[in-house]
Amino acid sequence: MTYYSKNHLWIKTEGENAEIGLTDYAIEKLGSIVFLNLPDVGDSLSVGERFGDIESIKTVSDLISPVDGEVSEINEMLLDEPEKVSEKPSEIWLIKACCACLPDSLMSAQEYDSLKEKL
């Protein structure tokens, strides 16, 4: 199942495993990505807390965790080639995490589309 956060991240879940990535909307607003700072494997994630940042030619933005859990893997390729995340944002994950339950604040695709229309 895929969910979305108000901070423009997507979350794809399978059991307690989640992949987290940037939405197309986020990439469109950020522009060309030049640097990614991601957490270490084993780091804790807390909903609403910063877990890294992303730098584009326009700005530097915090990555805000949409889930509580623990980082199980980071996308190493993006550390060397951060611009790759822009190629297929809906498919390229930033981190993988173990999370026991999902917060109620996550949105369906329809709810996320409604949010974007208001921005």
Image (cartoon, grey):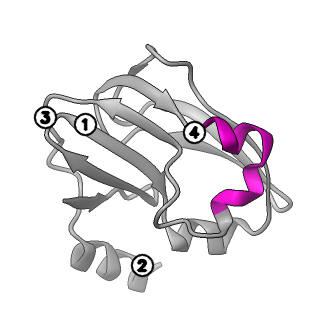
Kind of residue sitting beneath label 1: Asn
The reply to whether dot 3 and dot 1 touch (C-beta < 8 Å) is: no
Q: Is residue 41 above or below residue 119?
A: above
Q: Classify mark 4: helix, strand or loop.
A: loop
The residue singled out by tag 4 in the image is 75
How far separated are the C-alphas under marks 1 and 2? 27 Å
The reply to whether dot 1 and dot 2 touch (C-beta < 8 Å) is: no
Task: Give the number of the mark in front: 4 or 2.
Answer: 4
Q: Which mark is residue 101?
A: 3
Task: Give the number of the mark in front: 2 or 3.
Answer: 3
Kind of residue sitting beneath label 3: Cys
The reply to whether dot 4 and dot 1 touch (C-beta < 8 Å) is: no
Q: Who's the residue at 35% across and 26% down the image?
A: 46
Quarter of the figure that contains the N terminus: bottom left
Q: Who's the residue at 48% across and 65% down the image?
A: 23
How far separated are the C-alphas under marks 2 and 3? 25 Å
The magenta region covers 75-85
How far separated are the C-alphas under marks 3 and 1? 10 Å
Question: Which x, y percent locates residue 66?
Answer: 35, 43
How far separated are the C-alphas under marks 4 and 3? 22 Å
Residue 3 appears left or right of 102: right
Kind of residue sitting beneath label 2: Lys
Residue 28, picture quadrant? bottom right
Q: Who's the residue at 17% across and 34% down the image?
A: 16
Question: Which x, y percent locates residue 118?
Answer: 40, 82
How far separated are the C-alphas under marks 4 and 1? 15 Å
Residue 76 appears left or right of 119: right
Q: Classify mark 3: helix, strand or loop.
A: loop
The reply to whether dot 2 and dot 3 touch (C-beta < 8 Å) is: no
